[in-house]
Image (cartoon, helix red, strand yellow):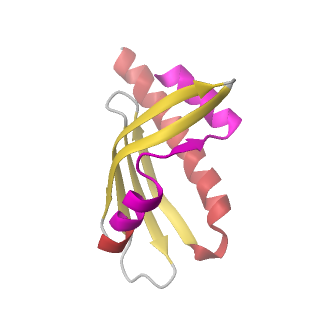
Amino acid sequence: MWDFVRNTKDSAMAAGARRYINSKLGGMGEMTEFSIDTKTKAVRVRLELLGESQPIELHVTKYSLKQKGGETHITVEEATASREWMTVALREFVIGKSFLLPSGAGTVLKLLV
């Protein structure tokens, strides 16, 4: 039963994340898929970006959440992409770095872990 509840919450969180990220992408393209598995701490993303002939797949295979002063920060610990250049960019700019989550997202994620 708890898996059903977690899966339902994961799906709701994914829908919210997709809307939020698409609002930030502007004219660059669209996130067409977003799934999160809070049990395994994994995320899958599919982006359809302008100028790209095929969608780009991102796979976060491990992330962690930390509370700091009432704020929630996410650290991507392992990730790859379907484009080599993006995997290099993930290693350079994302993996191992902490990012502040929007307050609503942090609140929901705390309920899921």
Q: Does the magenta stretch include residue 36?
A: no
Q: How many labels does the image show?
A: 0
Residue 51, compared with residue 14, is above or below; it is: below
Residue at (40% x, 30% y) in the render: 38
Chief SS of the magenta region: helix
Q: Where is residue 113 in the image (x, y as percent from the top left)?
A: 46, 22
Q: Is residue 97 magenta?
A: yes
Which residue does the image show at 37% across and 58% down from the upper left?
Answer: 91
Left or right: residue 105 versus residue 55 is: right
Give coordinates of residue 18: x percent, y percent: 55, 52
The magenta region covers: 87-113
- When asked about the image quadrant of residue 67, the answer is top right
Q: Compared with residue 105, is residue 53 higher up or lower down, i.e. above or below? A: below
Where is residue 24 shown, x and y percent of the image?
A: 66, 61
Relative depth, front residue between 79 and 14: 79
Residue sitting at the far top:
1
Identify which residue is drawn at 42% across, 61% down.
92
Q: Is residue 43 or residue 63 the one in the foreground?
A: 63
Q: Assign the N terminus to one quadrant of the image.
A: top left
* Residue 52, placed above or below residue 47: below
